[in-house]
Amino acid sequence: MRNNKKKLTLIIPVYNEEKTLKKIISKALKKEFGLEKEIIVVNDGSTDKSLNKIKEIKNKKIKIISYEKNKGKGYAIRKGIEISTGDIIAIQDADLEYNLNDLKKLVNTLIREDLNVIYGSRFLKKNNFYKKNSFYWGNRFLSLLTSLLYLKKITDMETCYKVFKKEVIKNLELKSDGFEIEPEITSKILKKKYKIKEIPISYRPRKKDEGKKIKWRDGFIALKILIKERIKK
């Protein structure tokens, strides 16, 4: 895949991220990927000033979807995919846990090696700081389970940084509304026999009081999705 006239769509789902939203959108606008770019910001029923922060950034590269009721990260991503026009589609959280320099590396690798899918793995970069709490071990367990169920080694199934050719992600027929969108995406990609390449990325995990929203029960839902998709014909 050459990058001549190729377009990148960056989908940013947002729920109550007024503290970091303008900064991450500004970073995304400034980051040069070497190809045309559109940014789709999906305001998922935020009750803070997130929508106002989005509207303050006036740029023709930004498309805004907004709805009043919170429906979940998966729903927001699916709506973003529906209106995306890029040849390459990537997901970016609205916080500052991930580094856009890594996303550029992912996009460039996908183009250079003509890949269908590439993931950024937080666990392949050894100098990342982790507090080895329930979220850490839950992520490691779910990634290991994915590897065992689908017979393909995956070190970071729950990573935000997933990059796809449009024909891959648009043909998955995604259904999830919540955080279970992550295992659903990975399960369906592996069932379709696409190879997922992983490369190391940096990561700065935020704390609950900084706005982290995923809860331990989401891990049980992810477990259910992994098994359900594996046995589904």
Image: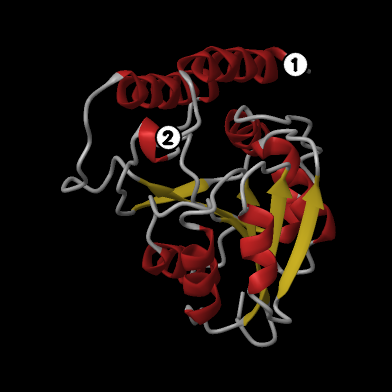
Q: Nearer the viewer, residue 145 or 20?
A: 20
Q: Residue at x 83, y 53 (%)?
A: 82
Give the residue type at disc 1: Lys
**Disc 2 to disc 1: CB gap under 8 Å:** no
Give the residue type at disc 2: Ile
Q: Which quadrant does the C terminus fall into?
A: top right
Q: Earlier in the sequence, mark 2 or mark 1?
A: 2
Q: Residue at x 47, y 72 (%)?
A: 27
* Horizontal relation, residue 139 to residue 222: left or right: left
| Residue 112 shows in this picture | no
Callout 2: helix, strand or loop? loop
Callout 1: helix, strand or loop? loop
Residue 170: percent from the left, percent from the top? 78, 50
Q: Nearer the viewer, residue 82 or 166?
A: 82
Q: Is residue 45 above or below residue 170?
A: above
Q: Is residue 92 above or below residue 192?
A: below
Q: Nearer the viewer, residue 79 or 158?
A: 79
Q: Which residue is mark 1?
A: 232
Q: Which residue is mark 2?
A: 154
Q: Which quadrant does the N terminus fall into?
A: bottom right
Name the outermost residue toward the bottom.
4
